[in-house]
C-alpha cells in the first residue's frame, strides 16, 4: 500500500472520530419507541436548589417506557442539580442504542473548584475515575457519596439536543427516572438506587425527561 492510501485511511479514521466526538454537529436522537407506541416521560418530584439528588417513589400509574431497543422499567423518580465533572460519548455497543452519553456529575463539595482542581477526573468504558496526588481533597466516602457516573437516555428530541450541548464545568438540572432496561432476548441494564455505592453496578441509568444547563 502506498503513502497516499495510508494518508486517505488516516483521514477517514480522523473524520469518523470527529463525527462521533462532542465537537461534531451530529445530535444523536432519542431512542425510538416500539412501533405504534407513544412514549411520555412525566417529570418526577423536583429537587430543591442546593439539595443532594432527590430519589422518589414510582407512581403505581406510571407504565414502563416501551422502546424498540428495550423496555425501560421505572425504578425511582430522580431529580438533581449538579456540576458536570466530565462527559463521554459512546456510539458502539448495546448500551449506546439507548444512551449516547455518560455524565460524571458532582454535588455538595464535589462542585467546588478548590476540590476539583486537586482531582484528575476521567471516563472510559462506561466508568468514571478520579485520582489525586498527596492527600485527598475530601474523604473518599464523601467523594463516592457526592459524585457518580450516570448513563443518560434522552426521552425526546429536546432532551437529546440539550444533552448534546452539555460540557464539563457546567451546572445541570436533570429530571427523569432511574430505570432497568430489559430487552426481548433477556439482556438487562439496571440502574443503581444508591448514591453511596461504587464499582460495578454503581452507575445510575437515567431516562431523562428534561435537562437544562448553564
Image (tube, helix red, strand yellow):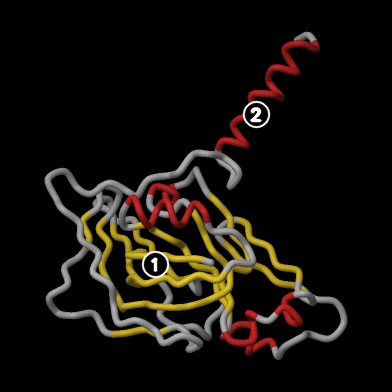
Instruction: Say left or right for 50 vs 161.
Output: right
Q: Residue furthest right?
A: 134
* Residue indicated by mark 2: 13
Secondary element under disc 2, as helix, strand or loop, is: helix
Label 1: how many Cα within 10 Å (few below 14, some 14–19, many 20+): many
Q: Position of residue 61 (x, y in %)?
A: 12, 75
Instruction: Say left or right for 58 vs 134.
Output: left
Q: Is residue 20 above or below residue 183?
A: above
Q: Which residue is painted at 44% across and 78% down in the image?
A: 80
Q: Which residue is painted at 17% across and 72% down in the image?
A: 62
The answer to which of 210 and 143 lies nearer the viewer is 210
Q: Earlier in the sequence, mark 1 or mark 2?
A: 2
Q: How many numbered circles does the render carry?
A: 2
The answer to which of 113 and 128 lies nearer the viewer is 113
Secondary element under disc 1, as helix, strand or loop, is: strand
Q: Which residue is painted at 69% across and 24% down in the image?
A: 11
Instruction: Say left or right for 180 vs 164.
Output: left
Q: Position of residue 84 (x, y in %)?
A: 58, 68
Q: Position of residue 126 (x, y in %)?
A: 55, 59
* Residue indicated by mark 1: 206
Amino acid at each position: 500500500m502506498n503513502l497516499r492510501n495510508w494518508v486517505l485511511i488516516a483521514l477517514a479514521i480522523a473524520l469518523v472520530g470527529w463525527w462521533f466526538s462532542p465537537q461534531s454537529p451530529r445530535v444523536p436522537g432519542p431512542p425510538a419507541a416500539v412501533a405504534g407506541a407513544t412514549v411520555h416521560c412525566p417529570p418526577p418530584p423536583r429537587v430543591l436548589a442546593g439539595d443532594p439528588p432527590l430519589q422518589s417513589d414510582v407512581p403505581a400509574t406510571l407504565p414502563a417506557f416501551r422502546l424498540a431497543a428495550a423496555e425501560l422499567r421505572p425504578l425511582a423518580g430522580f431529580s438533581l442539580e449538579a456540576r458536570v465533572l466530565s462527559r463521554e460519548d459512546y456510539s458502539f455497543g448495546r448500551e449506546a442504542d439507548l444512551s449516547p452519553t455518560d455524565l460524571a456529575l458532582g454535588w455538595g463539595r464535589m462542585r467546588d473548584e478548590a476540590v476539583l482542581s486537586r482531582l484528575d477526573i476521567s471516563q472510559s468504558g462506561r466508568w468514571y475515575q478520579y485520582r489525586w496526588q498527596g492527600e485527598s481533597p475530601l474523604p473518599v466516602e464523601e467523594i463516592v457519596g457526592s459524585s457518580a457516573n450516570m448513563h443518560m437516555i434522552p426521552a425526546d428530541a429536546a432532551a437529546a439536543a440539550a444533552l448534546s450541548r452539555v460540557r464539563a464545568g457546567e451546572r445541570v438540572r436533570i429530571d427523569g427516572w432511574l430505570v432497568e432496561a430489559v430487552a426481548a432476548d433477556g439482556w438487562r441494564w439496571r440502574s443503581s438506587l444508591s448514591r453511596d455505592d461504587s464499582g460495578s453496578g454503581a452507575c445510575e441509568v437515567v431516562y431523562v425527561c428534561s435537562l437544562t444547563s448553564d
